Image (tube, grey):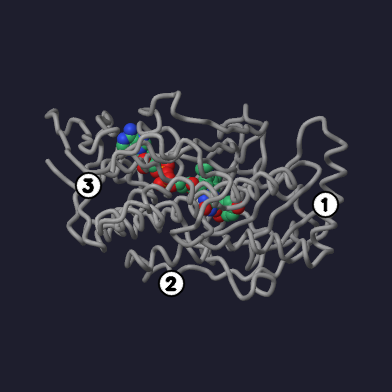
């Protein structure tokens, strides 16, 4: 079999890339380890930046999210028993975010791909990558017990943090930057009305909490918990009780509880692998970087990576190689800014064990944040999402990294 781009992973990065390439007339195949139902059942992100929405519009997959997504022009912070609103819209020059579940987004992308008649192979757990340091890479796997061999021009590694693509790169060619946090998030989804019209991020002496939503009738809540906990340790009663304890009195009085429809534990991690291009293998999304979910940046970074990757591949097929040459550096400059914001917000809002000094600093910084227009504006600018730099940016601190070491055009 032959295609122009073999895409590994049918998460949001792989599916969006497939759609963007298809719109530009670039042929592609998507290969996914898990079943379609498994991929569509994963509960994850909820907040989309305007850049993500415009990438989805470019891919022709924005009709339902424009109808059903909830436009948010502010977020709320709770600490010291009080709530404070940050007016994202006013402070960012009229921008906003859209609350729309990753599950719904993945469904829209999956259906659009099927409607366009594009090839997707689900349940192929044994994908291997070959010769991506030449101009003739290949992807091998088995389908229904028979070996399949795809010859392609490029391999797009959109297979998440635990995928095969980054793992196929020689360790010496990768530089890993990493920070682990000593806690996770226990998440609960319920068909109850959300606490409020806006998201509420909570710093309390008992730890972080987040009140989010998927719609006007479906809520998503998180509480910080030890990494050693499991879902079994958290009955619905314990979860609601702990969440209520962490809220300010006004919010606690308004909380409406109900039976959970899903619960899961997410560890928190910051991770960047550099570069993102190895000859004809290009990494995008969680395959190359992870942010703790506090800043709501993971899915949005995956979308901006693939937007930049699709632009670079379009340029390549029009006879210009500079897009691919700059792909890694262009992505990494934006990624590191989102890593910084996500790390900062995580450090500001969570309780760190045995760190009373840090706790007082958090309080001082939170008071500064809500009291200073300049600090609130910086928060708003980052939360709604930083602008995408134009394709031919001359280069920044990340340039000159190993990005151009393997360079078969
Ligand atoms: P994904 O979604 O992990 O998809 C990768 C796909 O690749 C498949 N795969 C393979 N396929 C073939 N062969 C192999 N060997 C393979 N290995 C893996 C996998 O099965 C999977 O289908 O990565 P992608 O596409 O890069 O998307 C990234 C986002 O999913 C992720 O960053 C976000 O969910 C992060 N995130 C959030 N991001 C936001 O922008 N806003 C949010 O509000 C937000 N909230 C969150 C989050 C992540 C969370 N968790 C669970 C960590 C909240 C939470 C709790
Ligand atoms: C979510 O709704 O799942 C969500 C929202 C905001 C975040 C993280 C997760 O920062």
Label 2, label 3: how many angstroms apart (C-alpha)?
A: 28 Å
Q: Residues within 10 Å of mark 1 (few under 14, many from 20)?
A: some
Residue 214, position as x, y percentages in the image:
51, 60
Give the mark count: 3
Identify the mark nearer the N-term, 2 or 1. 2
Secondary structure at numbered mark 2: helix
Identify the mark nearer the N-term, 1 or 3. 3
Indicate the quadrant where residue 271 lies.
Answer: top right
Indicate the quadrant where residue 150 lies.
Answer: top left
Whether disc 2's CB lies below 8 Å from ligand 1 is answered: no
Residue 282, position as x, y percentages in the image:
36, 42
Secondary structure at numbered mark 3: strand
* Contact between labelled residues 1 and 2, with CB atoms less than 8 Å apart: no
Which residue is tagged 1?
365
Image quadrant in which the N terminus is located = top left
Label 2, label 1: how many angstroms apart (C-alpha)?
A: 36 Å
Secondary structure at numbered mark 1: helix
Label 1, label 3: how many angstroms apart (C-alpha)?
A: 48 Å
Task: Out of 232 and 50, give the one closest to the viewer.
Answer: 50
Horizontal relation, residue 338 to residue 305: left or right: right
Residue 52, position as x, y percentages in the image:
46, 61
Question: For residue 66, which numbered disc appears in the image?
Answer: 2
| Placement of 200 over or under 142, stated as above or below | below
Horizontal relation, residue 288 to residue 114: left or right: right
Residue 148, position as x, y percentages in the image:
14, 33
Nearer to us: label 2 or label 1: 1
Identify the mark nearer the N-term, 2 or 3. 3
Question: For residue 29, which numbered disc appears in the image?
Answer: 3
Task: Out of 93 and 281, give the one closest to the viewer.
Answer: 281
């Amino acid at each position: 079999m032959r295609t122009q781009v073999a895409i590994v992973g049918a998460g949001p990065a792989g599916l969006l890339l497939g759609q963007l390439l298809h719109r530009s007339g670039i042929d592609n195949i998507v290969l996914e380890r898990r079943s379609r139902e498994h991929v569509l059942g994963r509960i994850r992100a909820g907040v989309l930046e305007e850049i993500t929405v415009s990438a989805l519009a470019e891919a022709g997959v924005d009709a339902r999210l424009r109808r059903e997504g909830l436009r948010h022009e502010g977020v709320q912070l709770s600490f010291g028993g009080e709530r404070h609103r940050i007016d994202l819209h006013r402070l960012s020059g009229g921008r906003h975010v859209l609350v729309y579940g990753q599950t719904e987004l993945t469904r829209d992308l999956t259906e659009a791909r099927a409607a366009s008649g594009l090839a997707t192979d689900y349940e192929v757990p044994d994908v291997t990558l070959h010769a991506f340091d030449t101009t003739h890479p290949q992807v091998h796997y088995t389908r229904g017990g028979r070996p399949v061999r795809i010859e392609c021009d490029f391999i797009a590694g959109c297979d998440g943090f635990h995928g095969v693509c980054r793992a196929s790169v020689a360790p010496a060619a990768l530089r890993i930057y990493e920070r682990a946090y000593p806690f996770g998030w226990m998440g609960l989804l319920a068909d109850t009305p959300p606490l409020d019209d806006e998201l509420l991020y909570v710093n309390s002496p008992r730890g972080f909490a987040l009140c989010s939503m998927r719609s006007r009738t479906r809520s998503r809540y998180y509480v910080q918990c030890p990494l050693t906990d499991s879902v079994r340790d958290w009955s619905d009663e314990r979860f609601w009780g702990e969440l209520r304890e962490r809220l300010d009195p006004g919010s606690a009085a308004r909380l409406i509880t109900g039976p959970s429809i899903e619960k899961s534990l997410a560890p928190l991690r910051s991770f960047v692998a550099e570069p993102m291009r190895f000859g004809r293998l290009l990494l995008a999304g969680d395959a190359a970087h992870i942010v703790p979910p506090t800043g709501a940046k993971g899915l949005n970074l995956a979308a901006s990576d693939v937007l930049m990757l699709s632009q670079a591949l379009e340029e390549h097929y029009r006879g210009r190689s500079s897009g691919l040459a700059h792909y890694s550096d262009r992505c990494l400059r934006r990624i590191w800014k989102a890593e910084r914001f996500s790390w900062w917000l995580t450090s500001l809002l969570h309780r760190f064990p045995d760190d009373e000094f840090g706790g007082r600093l958090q309080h001082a910084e939170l008071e500064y944040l809500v009291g200073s227009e300049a600090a609130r504006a910086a928060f708003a600018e980052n939360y709604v999402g930083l602008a995408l730099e134009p394709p031919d940016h001359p280069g920044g601190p990340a340039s000159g990294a190993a990005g151009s070491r393997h360079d078969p055009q």
